[in-house]
Image (spheres, grey):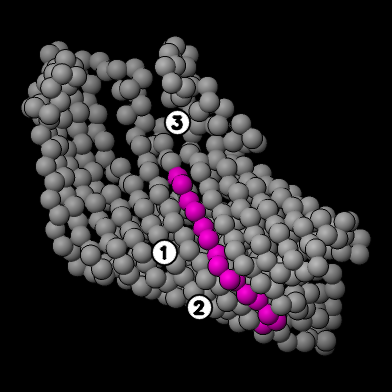
Amino acid sequence: MQSIFSTWMIILSFFGYNARGISLAGALTGSDAGPQTGYYNPAMLAYSKSQWTALSFLFIGAFAGNSAFTFGDINQYFQKNKVLNEYDKRHLLFRIGNGPLSLLSRDEVSLLAFKTPGFGIALEGFGEIDANLHRQIFELLLNGNNIGDVYHLTHLYNRALAYVSLDLAIGKGIYTMELNPLRRFFFGIGLKAIRGLAYANLDRTDITLSVDSNYIYVDGYGRIISSFGGSGMGLDLGIGFEADNWSFGLSILNLFSKIRWNEADSATIFTIKSDSFTVSDLINNPDTIIVDTSWTEPIEVFYTNMPIVFRMGLASSFLNGNVRLFSDFVYRADKDNPETKLGFATELRFIPFLPLRFGIALTNLGNFYTFGGGIRIFGVSLDTGFAFYRGIFMGSRGFRAGVDLGINLP
């Protein structure tokens, strides 16, 4: 069974469930991340500079993006009644490259996340739709076909996922005066109780389209695995150190994780076939020339899991805490799609009640450029975060934004 997490999801998972994390390129492994500290590194709940009780009433984050086209491309080439010339067609195919076009929509919600020294709890929700379209589909649409062309459309993996989780994390600190300059050592553990809401995966496809001098032929099949309920759990571990003005964190997320999908599990199989038809037939009588059938079969309980993620981070502050620096390295251990990220960020607190944040996340699938800010008035906190994928503004191929409302956020 395919993992529920695609390559796109790993880029996004670097940022976590708060707006401050988005604006700091997700580089909070070695620092206080507020009520969602357990997501990055449960050990840092015991960090001496995070001894404030903090509460996040609501975090909402959303991402929309694709692997090929910038917002400028979409605005220029996908207008209604737009006529594409040869240069436009070549440009669009160049953007797609040799692989499929990936489209993603991702939404996150964190409700009543709470942190006090050494303990954190958060109720979180997640939803994702991930679609992948073969380059050959666009070649046909843009350029038509030549006589004798044969197209094989296989492995059209498309997924949808939704779940909620209750995350508990505990951190403990130990003084290490005899190991000067190390002042404290931290360790922590995090547990996730996961409730799966919906899962669907187009896990098998094989469609062949061929053309001769007179006719077009289509033959193919596919299968969709789905479930509307399940449960699971996850385990995270973390350690950290504090030395003078520096802090260091190391965590292993999803050291163990599994979701058991066992409600309304089914497999929908579909076939599509046509012996021969012309373009005129396709336009005038599509229902009579293409035969498609589908049926649903119950299947056994199945399992999915989340890949292990290694995080290592460093943080420091200068100028009486007015300048804070963050960096981290993240590696997702997956034999099929290993992912890496190197993040750098800074937070400016020259105006204590108006923190400003900037960062960059360098990943093997493209870079994110991030920024955001916050408001701190009498303990009430409002944070915003923005991230642009592989470009800025209209040159970006994806946009991520989040807002977080709480009390005593860092």
- Where 308 falls versus 42 (above or below)? above
Say which label, 3 or 2, has the lower sequence index.
3
Give the spatial CA distance, label 1 vs label 3.
Answer: 31 Å
Q: Nearer the viewer, mark 3 or mark 2?
A: 2
Assign a secondary structure to mark 2: strand
Image quarter where the N terminus lies is bottom left
Assign a secondary structure to mark 3: helix
Residue shown at the point (74%, 66%) measured from the top left: 380
Dot 1: few (<14), some (14–19), or many (≥20) neighbours within 10 Å? some
| Residue 90 found in image quarter | top left
> Quick check: marks 3 and 2 in contact, CB under 8 Å?
no
Residue 155 visible to the viewer? yes
> Quick check: marks 1 and 3 in contact, CB under 8 Å?
no
In magenta, the rendered stretch is 104-118
Image coordinates for residue 38, horizontal then vertical, percent: 60, 72
Horizontal arrangement in the rendering, residue 35 relative to residue 262 (left or right): right
| Residue 261 found in image quarter | bottom left
Residue 345 visible to the viewer? no
Q: Is residue 111 magenta?
A: yes
Residue shown at the point (85%, 73%) measured from the top left: 244
Image coordinates for residue 404, horizontal then vertical, percent: 64, 60
Q: Determine which of the numbered discs, if any, sits on residue 163 in the image.
A: 1
Residue denoted by label 2:
191
**Magenta segment, principal secondary structure?**
strand
Give the spatial CA distance, label 1 vs label 2.
Answer: 16 Å
Dot 2: few (<14), some (14–19), or many (≥20) neighbours within 10 Å? many
